[in-house]
Amino acid sequence: MNSTSAEPLRVLLVDDDQAFGTAMAKALRRRGFEVSVLDGGAEAVLALGGRAGPAPHVAVLDLRMPDVGGLEVLRRTPARTVPVVVLTGHGSVPDAVEAMRLGAYTFLTKPVDAADLAPILEQAAAPASPALALVGKSPATAGLRELLARLADADEPVLLTGETGTGKEVAARTLHHGSRRTDAPFLAVNMACLPGELVESELFGHVRGAFTGADRGKPGLFAEVGNGTLFLDEVGELPLAHQAKLLRVLETRTFRAVGDTREQTFRGRLVAATHRDLRREVLEGRFREDLFYRLQVLPLELPPLRHRREDILPIVQHWLGRVASQALAVSPEAEALLLAHEWPGNVREVVNLARRVALFAEGGQVTAELVRRMLAANPFVQTAAAAAPVTTPPEGLTEGAVEEISLEALERRHILGLLAHHKNVTHVARILEINRRTLQRKLKAWGIEHDDLP
């Protein structure tokens, strides 16, 4: 086992299938891993939240469990620092994609054996190199590196803005690792994943008896971060009722745990990020104007990938080198496809593609056909189809018939079906792995306003 330290990698295996858990734990231990096994999601929430003994280096999480499912585990642990590899069946690939959006490192479809899992665990647990985090050779990326270096030791809050997937957390970590705070923790929490009723307790902590069920005290992130960096991702999702409390922390550098009368001092540095236009949020009454200006002391906008296309191939090569179990060569035809793609999901989309390509590449070669398949709306359709049961043809078609429909019409049908079901443009945009504005432009081109939808 290639470990980055003398101690074995600690693996947390969470699966309600006890036979699988026992067999996989035994196989991984033979390979030098230290494995602990849990058979339910409720215990996993405690373990990944750092409230149940020493944290593992990496976790393996089954998505389908009867008590608390894998997706719910990810939602309840937004501040976790443990990389998570999720396991799913062929029929739940959409759930696995949602898990990636909730911060999972990657996913594998069952059945899986230790030979396949072991290298993925080592890759997930390998520490990222801060010097290599911002990959690219474009002028925009070079300018971003310079600005981050200048802001690294500033004590004032930094507000990172930009489209979804442009690398705001990478920028926040770069700020931290380039500062004098590098020996202190970097803690991150995604406000969009944090239920409103838990925001105050997660950020500020609570004392015993502060509310029903609070049988013991819990320090919040503002206390746990110490002299380090606290990263509030998607700060635009912070409920209005809690925005005044965040403003008070920034203005006075003090806070109170829920149910406590004592003031505590915030000694760390705050970095916030959002993909929203906070000025518009202020005008529409969803974000406090005074908090906006307090966060806006050191604003930094991250450019989308379409404005730094020179970075596409270096990012692909970098991530293939990190996640692939073998050296992979990208063919010129594959490179041309990568450069021609729009990348609405920005760097996150590139990283996800690299992870998929690394799992499916054969013979040490990344071909144009593989890239084309991995860029498809459902890259696993060929894999899943082999195991899928035979179904009846769509209504109105006889067996063996082909529905003659244009790609645009098929896209329109699919998107409107998703909107009719979910009734939320932002959620559907996430399912489609495009940004919200791209989806809105498509709807406008079709003459459809969201309010017109059923």
Image (cartoon, grey):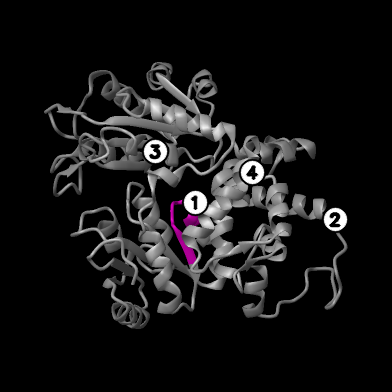
Residue 254, horizontal then vertical, whole percent: 20, 24
Residue 417, horizontal then vertical, whole percent: 69, 53
The residue that label 2 is drawn on is: 406
The residue that label 3 is drawn on is: 174
Under circle 4, the secondary element is loop
Say few, some or many: other residues with alpha carbon within 10 Å of mark 3 (under 14 / 14 to 19 / 20 or more): many
Residue type at tag 2: Ser
Tag 4 and tag 2, C-beta contact below 8 Å? no
Which mark is on residue 101? 1
Under circle 3, the secondary element is helix
Q: Residue at x 61, y 73 (%)?
A: 362
Residue 299, horizontal then vertical, whole percent: 45, 23
- Compared with residue 142, is residue 7 higher up or lower down, i.e. above or below? below
Q: Earlier in the sequence, mark 3 or mark 1?
A: 1
Measured in 3D between alpha carbons, the distance from the residue under mark 4 to the one under mark 2, in whole angstroms, is: 22 Å
The residue that label 4 is drawn on is: 344
Q: Residue at x 37, y 34 (%)?
A: 175
Residue type at tag 3: Thr
Under circle 2, the secondary element is loop
**Residues in magenta, as a range:** 98-107
Residue type at tag 1: Arg
